[in-house]
Image: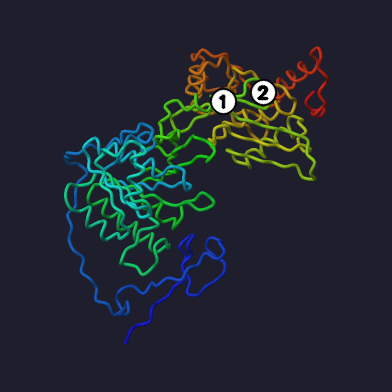
């Protein structure tokens, strides 16, 4: 008599399992995310009656030992090696996610081709495209002569058996993990159970063979890698490929990395011949800068160990709505709300009747709080219609009391600013003495946000009282006098 299948309803967002269908997952709160899956397994015998398998002995190794292979394998792309920590570690597994069409396949095609040209066995397995489609991309990129081994396969067992034959592979790309399936589970490809089981089998092969494995993952509408979160814990590194479709810049960011820094970025430029590495991203982000325009400030930021200069743009206009609008691109909206509250509470800047639009030029996303002072300077500059000095950079963290707090790595920020031709820097007072005055810049230290606002307001008044100019309307309360 055939046994009845044991069905379970598994959430495709978080992996939680239920014995019946429910509209909302109680674990993650997503609606209509449950999918019916067969979790009966391959054995019809009850679990309590199955014979216990005796474990096999395996050899234990010591921490010391000779190895013939280099600890890292450079990919040939300096920006990719920067993000991974110097190259691919043997047996490591990387998960690369990004929006559709952002350039993930192009990046990995270039990486595998460079390794193949260096004499290593590089394998590219596509579960979404045919071999002819991958070849067309390689021809467009000028990489058709690279000895990359291609395959269009989705069975994990067939992939592992094929890779185990012949010369050991040094780099294996699986594009994508959502298309893979294994015989060990009875689920459709792309489901939580199938993605988890397929990733586990491929990771086990990478650890045993020593091949560096790259898994390409789809992303949800929120920008998170689709599938169970446990896959991100199983891999050694999670890389996020970011960028705007209207911009040619692409940023590879390390979200997790067991063998390197977790806040490094690699900058690429999308061209007709593929991705071009950008060795000086600051110059690229400032190439189309609006000089002398109110509401723009140059922020000296830090991404990992790399200093990056980027332009912050703000537009403050009177609102016609009952609730003023706050639109932010490239920065946290909660951080902008905090800066606006500090400006109104401690600096007397009236922004409750204005719409605020804030943008980070170039498509870069900023996460560090050191951008607070540059954002405040751009906001006040737009409010009073006073351009900031074109040769000045700003950085500093703003506290809720209105004080400007020091930030880390000030010398590196100032050195990058001096290299790009800036003459002055507005930065917080640093009691630790690492202000970096040897960079050749004129340093204007700021202890509180009130002094910065007063200086910009004075520039606005001077511009308004110039010959042929009309006085600007008052936008400050009495507490800034």
Chosen colour scheme = rainbow
In the picture provided, is 69 more to the left or to the right than 339?
A: left
Give the Cα distance between marks 1 and 2: 12 Å
Q: Is residue 148 above or below residue 347?
A: below
Find residue 447 and report its horizontal and vertical position in percent.
Answer: 64, 23
| Viewer-nearest residue: 98 or 230 | 98
Find residue 238 and report its horizontal and vertical position in percent.
Answer: 41, 46
Q: Is residue 387 above or below residue 86?
A: above
Q: Which of the marked residues, 1 or 2, is nearer the chain's N terminus?
A: 1
Q: Nearer the viewer, mark 1 or mark 2?
A: 1
* Residue depicted at x 54% and y 14%: 441
Q: Secondary structure at mark 2?
A: loop
Find residue 143 and report its horizontal and vertical position in percent.
Answer: 31, 37
Q: Quadrant of residue 342?
A: top right
Q: Quadrant of the N terminus?
A: bottom left
Find residue 182 and report its horizontal and vertical position in percent.
Answer: 32, 63
Disc 2: which residue: 293
- Asked if the residues shown at circle 1 and circle 2 are in contact, with their CB atoms under 8 angstroms apart, the answer is no
Q: Quadrant of the C terminus?
A: top right
**In the rendering, which numbered label is found on residue 288?**
1
Q: Quadrant of residue 148?
A: top left
Q: Is residue 275 above or below residue 175?
A: above
Q: Residues within 10 Å of mark 1 (few under 14, many from 20)?
A: few
* Residue depicted at x 75% and y 42%: 324
Q: Secondary structure at mark 1?
A: loop
**In the rendering, which numbered label is found on residue 369?**
none
Q: How many marks?
A: 2
| Viewer-nearest residue: 110 or 463 | 110
Q: Residues within 10 Å of mark 2 (few under 14, many from 20)?
A: some
């Amino acid at each position: 008599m055939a046994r009845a299948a044991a069905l379970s309803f598994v959430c495709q967002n978080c992996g939680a399992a239920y014995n019946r269908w429910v509209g909302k997952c109680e674990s993650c709160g997503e609606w209509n995310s449950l999918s019916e899956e067969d979790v009966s397994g391959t054995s019809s015998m009850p679990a309590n009656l199955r014979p216990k398998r005796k474990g096999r002995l395996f050899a234990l190794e010591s921490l010391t030992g000779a190895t013939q292979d280099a600890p890292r394998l450079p990919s040939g792309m300096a920006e990719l090696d920067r993000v991974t920590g110097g190259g691919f570690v043997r047996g490591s597994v990387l998960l690369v996610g990004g929006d559709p069409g952002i350039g993930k396949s192009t990046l990995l095609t270039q990486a595998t081709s460079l390794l193949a040209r260096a004499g290593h066995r590089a394998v590219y397995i596509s579960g979404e495209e045919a071999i002819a489609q991958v070849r067309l991309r390689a021809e467009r990129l000028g990489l058709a002569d690279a000895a990359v081994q291609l395959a269009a396969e989705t069975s994990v067992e067939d992939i592992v058996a094929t890779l185990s034959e012949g010369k050991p592979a040094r780099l294996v790309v699986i594009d994508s993990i959502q298309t893979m399936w294994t015989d060990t589970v009875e689920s459709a490809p792309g489901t939580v159970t199938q993605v988890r089981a397929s990733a586990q089998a491929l990771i086990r092969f990478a650890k045993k063979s020593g091949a560096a494995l790259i898994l390409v993952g789809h992303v949800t509408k929120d920008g998170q890698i689709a599938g169970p979160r446990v896959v991100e814990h199983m891999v050694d590194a999670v890389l996020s490929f970011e960028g705007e479709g209207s911009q040619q810049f692409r940023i590879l960011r390390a979200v997790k990395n067991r063998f390197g820094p977790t806040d490094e970025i690699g900058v690429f430029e999308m061209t007709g011949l593929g991705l071009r590495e950008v060795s000086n991203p600051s110059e690229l982000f400032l190439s189309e800068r609006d000089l002398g325009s109110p509401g723009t400030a140059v922020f000296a930021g830090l991404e990992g160990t790399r200093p990056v200069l980027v332009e912050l743009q703000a537009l403050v206009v009177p609102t016609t709505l009952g609730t003023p609008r706050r639109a932010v691109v490239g920065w946290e909206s909660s951080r902008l709300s905090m800066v606006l509250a500090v400006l109104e509470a401690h600096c007397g800047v009236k922004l409750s009747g204005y719409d605020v639009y804030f943008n980070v030029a170039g498509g870069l996303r900023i996460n560090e709080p050191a951008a607070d002072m540059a954002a405040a300077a751009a906001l006040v500059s737009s409010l009073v219609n006073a351009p900031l000095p074109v040769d000045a950079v700003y950085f500093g963290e703003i506290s809720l009391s209105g004080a400007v707090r020091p930030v880390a790595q000030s010398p590196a920020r100032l050195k990058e600013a001096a290299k790009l031709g800036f003459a002055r820097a507005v930065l917080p007072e640093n009691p630790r003495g690492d202000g970096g005055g040897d960079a050749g810049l004129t340093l204007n230290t700021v202890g509180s946000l009130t002094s910065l606002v007063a200086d910009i307001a004075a520039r606005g008044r001077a511009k308004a009282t110039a010959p042929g100019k009309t006085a600007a309307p008052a936008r400050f309360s009495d507490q800034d006098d």
